[in-house]
Image (cartoon, helix red, strand yellow):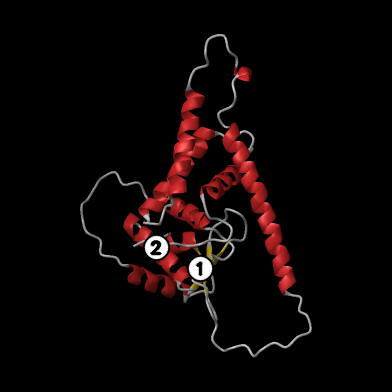
Amino acid sequence: MTYRIILDIFEGPFDLLLFLIKKNEVDIYDIPIHEITAQFLEYVELMKMLDLEIAGEFIEMVAILMNIKARMLLPLPVGISEDEIEDPRTELMERLIEYQRFKMAASDMGEMEDKKRLLYNHQYFPPVGSKEEISNEEFLQDVTLFDLLLAFKKALDNMPKVTYHEVRRIEVTIEQQTQFILTRLGQKTMMLFSELVGGIKERIIIIVTFVAILEMIKARRILVSQSELFEDIRIKLRTE
């Protein structure tokens, strides 16, 4: 089972790097490669765990980060100071800044396009059909896929630490967890993701619940949003 979710504000490895830089509140000109590489790998592992489609660019970025990390760990040649050696992060930093510049320009152009849509010339408009056409591309409301993965990671980290291992089969399906989500959302107009999964004690059930949320977003059955950047995910049923 593979999920391909196209996001308007989060698409590839450079977006993930910018997300991590913003999340950790670090200077883009002085990236802590060790921490960022470790977190980048955590997100890639989360995507693998959930069977999300990982583009080759993510794997390439892992290799770039690992290469930079290895070069920064090498001892300096005898008689040469740090100021005389080029920072291994320089090329990545320049590419990130350039990417961020184009991303901001694209965002500004998108806002201009949205404003332009509100202006109409005097002309004849044909009647609007009753059937709404829905694009094949799915967009998440106000949050990115990696905002969701951050909430998912927190849920796994907050699970009770098990000091023993018991082998047993847990029967749980996406359909069951979809109904579970609908039932919980039927009790209130909005629910936090942490509240939704707070009572779940089994790791596999949290994983299936998260996949069910992705399925419901694709099916346009729920809306997800955030009140502030990196805050808990808010989930509510679509009313239309």
Distance between the alpha carbons at the discs numbered 1 and 2: 18 Å
User: Three-letter amino acid code at disc 2?
Assistant: Val
Residue plotted at (53% across, 10% down): 78
Which residue is identified by label 2? 211
Question: Residue 46 location, x and y as percent?
Answer: 41, 50
> Which numbered marker is on residue 40?
none
Disc 1 marks a residue whose amino acid type is Glu
N-term-proximal mark, 1 vs 2: 1
| Residue at which label 1 appears | 137
Residue 7 at what x, y percent from top left?
54, 61
Q: Do the residues labelled 1 and 2 touch (CB within 8 Å)?
A: no
* Residue closest to the eye, 56 or 175: 56
Vertical side of 184 occupied by 91: above or below = above
Secondary element at image label 1 = loop
Left or right of 198 on screen, residue 130 = right
Q: Position of residue 164 (x, y in %)?
A: 25, 45
Residue 182 position by quadrant: bottom left
Viewer-side residue, 7 vs 146: 7
Does any portion of residue 132 appear in the rendered image?
A: yes
